Image (cartoon, coloured by chain):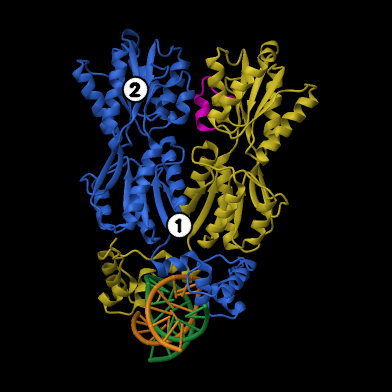
Chain colours: A blue, B yellow, C green, D orange
Amino acid sequence: MTKVTISIKKIAELAGVSYPTVSRALRNEGRIGEETRKRIVTIAREHGYTPNLTARGLVSKRSGALGLVFTRFSDPFHSDIAQKVEIEANRRGYSLFIASNETQDKERELEIVRSFQGRNVEGIIVSSGREGPRYSQLFRETNIPIVTVNSHAADHIGHSVCHDDYGGGCAIVQHLIKKGYQNIIYLGNGSADKAQSDRLRAWHDVLKKNSFVPAIHIDSPEGRVQDGAAATEQLLSQHSAQLRNMRSAIWCFNDAMALGALSVLHRHGFAIPTDIGVAGFDDIDSSAFAIPALTTWHQPRQEMASVAAQMLFGLIEVSDSPPADFVMPGWLVVRHST
Amino acid sequence: MTKVTISIKKIAELAGVSYPTVSRALRNEGRIGEETRKRIVTIAREHGYTPNLTARGLVSKRSGALGLVFTRFSDPFHSDIAQKVEIEANRRGYSLFIASNETQDKERELEIVRSFQGRNVEGIIVSSGREGPRYSQLFRETNIPIVTVNSHAADHIGHSVCHDDYGGGCAIVQHLIKKGYQNIIYLGNGSADKAQSDRLRAWHDVLKKNSFVPAIHIDSPEGRVQDGAAATEQLLSQHSAQLRNMRSAIWCFNDAMALGALSVLHRHGFAIPTDIGVAGFDDIDSSAFAIPALTTWHQPRQEMASVAAQMLFGLIEVSDSPPADFVMPGWLVVRHST
DNA sequence: CTGTTAGCGCCTTCAA
DNA sequence: TTGAAGGCGCTAACAG
């Protein structure tokens, strides 16, 4: 490809000045004659000059780029977070490197972080919901600011924005009990770390406290619509007696799975919420348009992403701020599926 | 933040060699003593060395980065394309800059392309579905390979991967006619360029050919679930008589909108597909789980993204390949909503 | 106000 | 096989 990218030098030549002068003119930096500045800017524009951010970054030590690692584009929850991060990054004049990790391989995620490092990003946001000792280690070693969303380094050594999953889980289960469901099933997501364990624990605790005994718990490999559908199929085939004998409700790890559950239940002729109740988690946009509209727990994901971004900007500007674990509250959204 | 990124120089010092030697060792480039190579590599690893891709890119002229501009993360169609592009980029060892354009501002999109240029990306994929003379102009001026997905520069001067929207639209409308619907409504997306105009034209043409007269057409500002819901509400309030008198079907610009339509129709007590038929376009993952499962047109978006990526890689390697407009076929998916 | 010099971290000649 | 110089495009001191 013909690389005819015009450089500062060429423009200097054309304008009959030295190239630092051009640099100053183009950056609108002080101490420069108004006449020359105008002349240089005109020439630059005429020749379609665009500054080489690579070179600029090399010397200024500010690449003007951020890195974002997240699960996958088809995940509505993490995608909304990614969207907000992208907007915030742009607003601050940053470009954004992105890498998804559709595999369930944690090592891959760490590799991504390292590659971002090699690209001299000024900060990294990890929104994958995964965590573990390897993460803590990497984050400790890395000298680039990192903020995680919805997971915290196991030893709370880093900076993170989380959500009160335990509280939300308790609220959902309590709501289901109050609605009179006697058998509360949990359809989980085996690939989520903190979110899954917190919600599972909430489910356990609330059931126990209310003297509900051994309830059904099925984990999916991931948290997609099809996973929720598959888990529900499995549920129906393995526990149909229990479902018919006790007034049951299904609580899904997230709304996507709940959508899949609704679909399968509908196909099998169950009336929601009378035959079976269904609840989700997250309150993604389409949940309000589910049939019937989905009862769920609202996670303020936009705000979480915003806070994460602000946190990161803070870390970029001020060095060595102490570890922080910001926990945000959500709220129950009761619609028509329970 | 303490930037203690270790450089090639330091390692050279530590190893007691000159830094070009280190460079060679680390890149596994020929002509280097096996002993020294090993020693250097060990030291590098011990000190957690990561090559500075910025600097490397500056001299090699190969940034190893690609740019992707697309609509928004919550758009299931374009997100799937983005996902595939990301995977392909990674497979080839590229990092990916991403920028979404949630605004409907085309100028913003061109700005993004320019900023990618400044970052020395080696290639750009534009998957926004937008087009126009300003695009053609920019693409012509830009010396970086650009491939567009689902839109082509008005004058066919660039490289693009498209889908046969007209053919798909015809097939959908014909299917609805065959199913016995007498009133075929189109709910469009005002922010899509090529896709909208092609589908709208298909709708017009097929209706005309079959002597159907003035049908209803409502455009939404965008193509999201809530847009489909809003358009359907509008439809119900303005044309209820017509809907009850003639056997009607609603064809939506995309599946997301169709999901919104299904929700509203359900809330208003319509039975699908007997009272009203609903069809979408795209065949996104969740369409199979809609209630009822959605009849739609399958766009091979993964393949489209793959082809676009391959096309781009080709352009990066070989300069000056002639304009190309790759058109991919889709297929009808009849489920239970019609 | 402007030009000179130096250097960011790396790769690529060329000699040795 | 290795080292010494030069330069990628730009900014940041200094001079003048």
Residue shown at 37% from the left, 47% from the top: A309
- Residue tagged by mark 1? B93
Q: Chain of mark 2?
A: A
Residue A300 visible from this viewpoint: yes
Q: Position of residue B264 (x, y in %)?
A: 55, 20
Side of A278 where B246 appears, left or right: right
Residue name at image x 58 percent, y 16 percent: B272
**Picture quadrant of residue B186:** top right
Amino acid type, label 1: Gly
Q: Nearer the viewer, residue A296 or B239?
A: B239
Identify the residue shown where x is 28% and y is 64%.
B45
What are the residue bounds of the magenta stretch?
A: B284-295
How many marks do you count on the picture? Answer: 2
Q: Dot 2 corresponds to which residue?
A: A251
Is B330 on the left-hand or right-hand side of B202?
A: left
Q: Secondary structure at mark 1?
A: loop
CA separation, marks 1 and 2? Answer: 41 Å
Q: Is residue B288 magenta?
A: yes
Instruction: Inspect this view and state whether residue A108 appears.
Output: no
* Residue A3 placement (x, y as % from top left): 59, 68
Q: Are marks 1 and 2 in contact (CB under 8 Å)?
A: no
Foreground mark, 1 or 2, reads: 2
Q: In which quadrant is the C terminus of chain A drawn?
A: top left
Q: Nearer the viewer, residue C14 or A163?
A: A163
Q: Chain of mark 1?
A: B
Image quarter in which the N terminus of chain A is found: bottom right
Q: Which mark is residue A246?
A: none
